[in-house]
Amino acid sequence: MDLGKHNHKIAIGARSNFLIALLVMGSAISLLSCEGDKSAADEEQTDEALVTRRVDSMRIVSSENGRLLNSMSAPLMEDHAFARPPFQEYRQGIEFVGYNDSTGVESSRVVADYALYWSDRDRWELKGNVLVTGEQNRRLYTQQLTWDRKIHKIYSNVDSKVEEGTDVFIGEGFEAEDDFSRWTFRRLTGTVSVDTAPTQPAESEPGTEPVSDSESQPAEPTLTQPAVQ
């Protein structure tokens, strides 16, 4: 998904009156020496915390030739344009949705409880209940995910789980294409295949009693080797 970059303008307004101006001038004389002692570290910390723009109920939609490509929505976006490097913070969560180019049907979705975006690096950091869904009923569950849009990769260094139909893969060091079409684990810790098809009861031999459901033992899940991606 490519949401594109957005140019931001900051409008700053100021309003004062004569009485306030006199008070400020008097206070400035006593504060002048203190301002001269401010360190570079203090200035950097101030710029880092300064929110230059705040947007509530944010939604951005990208389209081409009338076809919907992708969308991004978030309850709150806070822009830190003066930080080094500049970044945007999404403290109340974020959601991305990608659509198929030809049909316009949803093809992928990414949700997270928290996100950071570094505009100069074109990179996202997602944290907290991160869920990525793709085509063919493919899902990724993790608590941390980096999305590098320059190289079109998503990756995670924490424990992650991938579900493909009835197959479940668990491992560390997850990496995939950003459309979730191809994926791999650096270290796979387990795979499970679950057969969800109902089984037919076997016919009992003459003279024998059938085994009741309460006496039968559940089947163990089958461990399989992961498919080569």
Image (cartoon, rainbow, N blue to C red):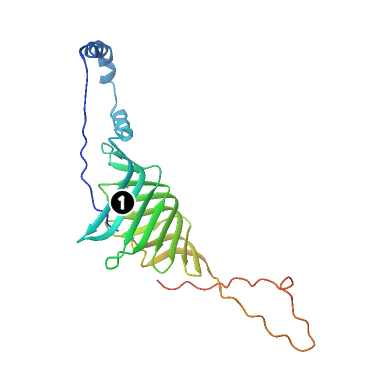
Give the x, y percent position of residue 169: 49, 66
In the picture of the structure, the residue carrying the numbered disc 1 is 123
Q: Quadrant of residue 57?
A: top left
Residue, x 36% and y 46% (percent of image)? 74
Q: Is residue 104 left or right of residue 134?
A: left
Is residue 170 positioned above or below 225 on the image?
above
User: In terms of depth relative to the viewer, which is nearer, 200 or 150?
Assistant: 200
Q: Count the marks: how many?
A: 1
Is residue 139 positioned above or below 123 on the image?
below
Dot 1 crowding, Cα within 10 Å, few <14, some 14–19, many 20+:
many
Is residue 79 positioned above or below 209 on the image?
above
User: In terms of depth relative to the viewer, which is nearer, 101 or 120?
Assistant: 101
Residue, x 24% and y 58% (percent of image)? 63
Q: Is residue 92 left or right of residue 22?
A: right
Q: Quadrant of residue 65?
A: bottom left
Residue, x 22% and y 42% (percent of image)? 8
Task: Find the residue positioned furthest to the bottom.
Answer: 206
Give the x, y percent position of residue 136: 41, 69
Is residue 41 positioned above or below 141 on the image?
above
Q: Is residue 68 left or right of residue 93?
A: left
Q: Is residue 31 left or right of residue 218?
A: left
Give the x, y percent position of residue 149: 29, 56
- In the rendered structure, which amino acid carries the disc numbered 1? Arg
From the image, which quarter does the C terminus lie in? bottom left
Give the x, y percent position of residue 85: 28, 42
